[in-house]
Image (tube, rainbow, N blue to C red):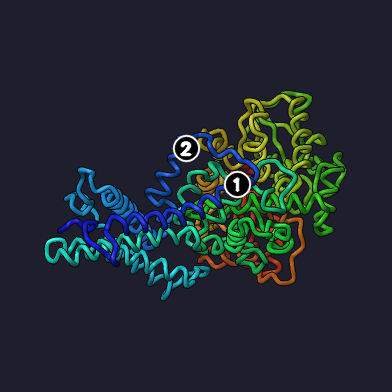
Amino acid sequence: MPDPVATELFGLPGPVLLWLLTLVSFFLFGRRVVAYVKILRKARGEKRWDDIGSRLKLFVVNVLAQGRLLRQPVIGVAHLLIFWAFVFYATGFFWNLLRGLIPVLPIPYADEAAWMSFCLAVFGVLGLLALAVAAVRRYIFPPPGLEKSGDATLILVLISLVLVSSLAGLYFHERDPSVAVGMWWLHMIVVLGFLAYLPYSKHLHLLASPFSVLFGELKPSGVPPVSEGAARRDQFTWRQLFSGLACAECGRCERVCPAFQSGLALSPKKLMHDFKELVRAGGNSHDGTAFVGGTVTHAEIWACLTCYACMQECPVFNEHIPPLVEMRRHLVSNGEMERQLQDVLTNLTRYGNSFGASPRTRAKWAQSLGFRVKDARKEPVEYLWFVGDYASFDPRAASSTCATARLLRHAGVDFGILHEAEQNAGTDARRVGEEGLFEMLMEKNLQAMGKARFRQIVTTDPHTYQALKNEYQSRNGAARVLHAAELLDELIRAGQLKVENKLQITATYHDPCYLGRYNAVFRPPRRVLQALGVGLVEMPRSRAESYCCGAGGGGIWREDTPDIKERPAESRVREAAGLPGVGTLVVSCPKDLVMFQDALKTAGLEGKLVVKDLMELAEMAACPAKEPMI
């Protein structure tokens, strides 16, 4: 094939035309990217350069291998092929561009190198097949929430044209050199046009998403850096704004969001779109002064349950929860919240618990035990049991709390509690935007724990578990933090707790968000159930895909809105009740117990399904005095 650049096109010498097109394309591309960078630089700083090894692993697994997308095998494989076709075609394009711009370089064109020509041909064909699968999915069998915009169609057409023009050039390379030259120029013009258009289009995520993964959250938290809240563009962090640029608007976040699925105002996809438009507004007057309460309504901000499902599902590691917490901080600081939430925050400030109960009554539940529970501040213990608010004060959780105490005593576990010195761990206060209150609660708890003598910490509350293990950071000293399900699993496996009476029941298990998604504790409760003789039937949404009960992020403190279709807890108990042969829903969180017991009544499922805490079942099976029945 003759040198394509040596030809004349549109009355211009090939090199002149290629230089002209390249300069225009790179100028338009660079101008827009630089504008975005300037906007991000004006935002608040946030450290995302730590632990480079873990970040590179994220990049390899979720960009190069498309790990999260492969959870859905068909479209995941299609995306993987499109991505690698893009990698090879981008390499071939810049190779050809460099050779065309500087003809004196002693290198062949990409399609003249045998190995590269082979790769381009293979990935070109595979890429076109993958694009066909993506098109069928988008236009014929679209999942809920997947955008079908004209911009999306244009992108598919452009990518297809890039692949077809290259494949045609390869095919006619020896057969008809003049056609091959024409295809070479068509390919270069389309790619340069694509490059210029991309940062101005809604598909900017093709450029931004690899960086979104690289700078993603390394460990589930959902908590932004300490701040006074955010309402304007420059008050958010650069990473929070960047999530909008990386969003593909694929709808995966909506499909797992309990708030959205319940009919509440929040759409995590729309939230990312709003942040994208906030950044795209550039130097215009839309600096975000009407962003909170305008573009993003108060109802949207308060609807989030901080269950982490959206962030776990997002294939480009966008972060939906942190900016919502930022906006909540702003609203809380201005007193813009519903009365019930305000009362709870007042209770936490005054009494150290969300119920507004006297701290002296925190251990009142223990009076019915028939034995004394040690005060860890006064005598040394192996385990400090951090009981938590709902396990301490809610009468619906009293039976499981007492069962835990009796079971630990039966197993010979040396444990104690902080009695009236224990405060709410602050997990939910932090996520409703009261960072200062979280700090106060944490300091009081750490002071009380500092007066106690213990080696390990155990709790039945996953929200407390998250705080003590991950958010109090290293200030717990060398103490290991366990959820009760983990401790129970260790006791049974070590032979310290023997199962005397197998339960012989069929049940399903609900993975709490803060134990499952946040901390990946999936196997211990299932091993315990197996040891207890429970026949476990998994729900369709289980383990990391478990559906939220609706309590997190302060959801348990807020009243239902009139437009709600069905509360998350009701959806969950219906899912459990629909399993063949299942009569028991097992939980390992006091809030789950409360939420699901209420949901049984409102869903009309009383008598068809019972909700039992894991510790209650363990006591029935392990303590001879308890009958092994539900």
Q: Quadrant of residue 351?
A: top right
Q: Residues within 10 Å of mark 1 (few under 14, many from 20)?
A: many
Which residue is labeled 1 in the image?
Answer: 238
Q: Amino acid at mark 1?
A: Trp
Left or right placement of residue 32 versus residue 9 in this view? right
Q: Residue placed at 69% from the left, 32% from the top? A: 384
Furthest toward the bottom, the residue is 140
**207 or 411, nearer to the observer:** 207
Image quadrant where one finds the N terminus: bottom left
Say the numbered circle drawn on residue 322: none
Q: Residues within 10 Å of mark 2 (few under 14, many from 20)?
A: few
Relative to 246, say whether 608 is above or below.
Answer: below
Q: Secondary structure at mark 2?
A: helix
Q: Earlier in the sequence, mark 1 or mark 2?
A: 2
Which residue is labeled 2 in the image?
Answer: 54
Instruction: Answer whether residue 583 is visible to the viewer in this image.
Output: no
Q: Amino acid at mark 2?
A: Ser
Relative to 288, say whether 561 is above or below.
Answer: below
Question: Looking at the picture, how far across and down is residue 479, in whole percent?
Answer: 63, 28
Question: Looking at the picture, how far across and down is residue 470, in whole percent?
Answer: 62, 37
Q: Secondary structure at mark 1?
A: helix
**549 or 14, nearer to the observer:** 14
**66 or 43, nearer to the observer:** 43
Question: Looking at the picture, how far across and down is residue 583, in whole percent?
Answer: 58, 62
Q: Residue placed at 79% from the left, 51% from the top? A: 332
